[in-house]
Amino acid sequence: MSARDIAVHQVLATLGYGDAIGNEALGIRRVLLDAGYESRIYVETVDPRLEDETEDYRDLIDDSRPDNILIHHFSLGSRASRVAFALPDRMILVYHNITPVRFLLDVRSPVVAQCYTGRRELGAYAPRCDLALGDSAFNRSELDALGFPRTGVLPVVPDFAHLDVTPHPWLARQFDDEATNILFVGRLIPNKRIEDLIRFFHAYRRRYNRASRLLLVGAHDLFDDYRAALADLVRRLGIPDVHLIGHVSNEELTALYDVADLFLSASEHEGFCVPLVEAFHKRIPVIAFAAAAVPATMDGGGVLYERKDPRHVASLINAVLTDAALEEEILAAQDAALARLRARDFAGTLLAFVDRVRTAHRLPPCRVASDFWRQLERLERLEALRSFRPSAFGALSEPAEDLPEPLHGAPPEATA
């Protein structure tokens, strides 16, 4: 069967503006369309700026075909994931990693339950997938440990087009002065250990350079308690010039990279960490904690540290920023690492995986509960009632029991 005879669609819980998974999904679709495949992206939720790029995941039910291939981006458990499980299409699962719950135990956020449920559900997809791909060797190792029989690595080859835009002029002027700008980009979530960055900056500023500022860039929605704790830490330490900037546009992000003197990371769990290579692309020296996938992502570029002693990290920051020869050596190593990353044949690797699945013997179907589609229909009706008639939904005698449990938390092997 040729490429023109089948479709290769993608499904994921949400397509976010400017995030790594969203950018990868759009890049995959470009490759598939160029190769002659029909290809659409089906989502449960989408940033309004990307609505024209997507279809509602429920439309996938009508577009599903047994000979089609479904690329399922798995990051959190979702209704879109469970629908994908129940469809007859062949499946390539792409795993972007899920933050282990141990990093989130002290946080009140619905994301904690989503991470727990997602990790709990992931293993159930092992017999369902024709192929499971990590977007790094670190992520592939987790798939192997969970018992996925056919795994591989679909490398992240970042497309930096979102940074090749005109920098936001006001933001650039605000921070483009004689002060030293230390930058972090990434969601403000506990595994990123933003509190460590604040302590490192505090030590650097007191010991070496009072004309410096810390720019913390990233969304904190659903983690407001954590952001409040960070702001309280800044207040208690009495540190000026710590800026919790939040989510930014591509133009704003470009401006912040342009004014940065150093990129600093203290994250303890990363499946890949795209901002590290964005900093490489912008030729900003990087200092990062050597944990999870970070050493492999940096691939010999930047500076890795293994001790979270604020005085030690502060001395590293000072050494990089005061020794021009050392900084050039670091940048040269980052340039080489980025060249190796960009030399990977992303399109060829992706199409080879698609061809492998397309020509393989079909797997036996997974068990799907006989009432799955009825439960899905009930859930959609209840969700519509909750969204558009909340008072009527609240008047239900036992609303929690009316939500079909199998689609609301139980693993797919029992429900889909």
Image (cartoon, helix red, strand yellow):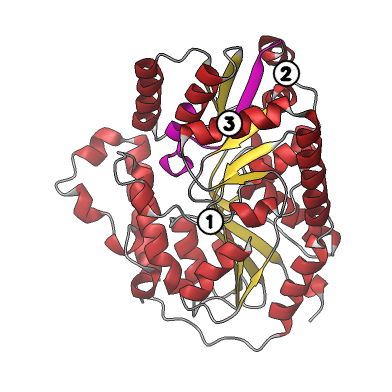
Percent across and percent down for residue 413 are: 38, 74
Three-letter code, disc 3: Ser
Residue at 56% from the left image edge and 57% from the top image edge = 96
Query: In the figure, 81 relative to 313: above or below?
Result: below
Percent across and percent down for residue 244 are: 50, 22
Percent across and percent down for residue 393 are: 25, 41
Q: Residue furthest left?
A: 397
Left or right: residue 341 compared with residue 266: right
Q: Nearer the viewer, residue 147 or 197?
A: 197
Please tell me whether mark 3 sits on a helix, a strand or a loop: helix
Q: Magenta residues, as a range?
A: 178-198
Please identify the quadrant where the C terminus is shown: bottom left
Query: In the figure, 185 relative to 145: above or below?
Result: above
Q: CA distance from mark 1 to mark 2?
A: 33 Å
Residue at 52% from the left image edge and 65% from the top image edge = 84
Please tell me whether mark 2 sits on a helix, a strand or a loop: loop
Q: CA distance from mark 3 to mark 2?
A: 32 Å
Contact check, label 3 and label 1, Cβ < 8 Å: no
**What residue does disc 1 label?**
292
Contact check, label 1 and label 2, Cβ < 8 Å: no
Contact check, label 3 and label 2, Cβ < 8 Å: no
Please tell me which of labels 3 and 1 falls first in the chain: 1
**Tag of residue 168:** 2
Q: Nearer the viewer, residue 233 or 40?
A: 233
Please identify the quadrant where the N terminus is shown: bottom right
- Mark 3 or mark 2: which is in front? 3
Three-letter code, disc 1: Ala
**What residue does disc 3 label?**
315
Please tell me which of labels 3 and 2 falls first in the chain: 2
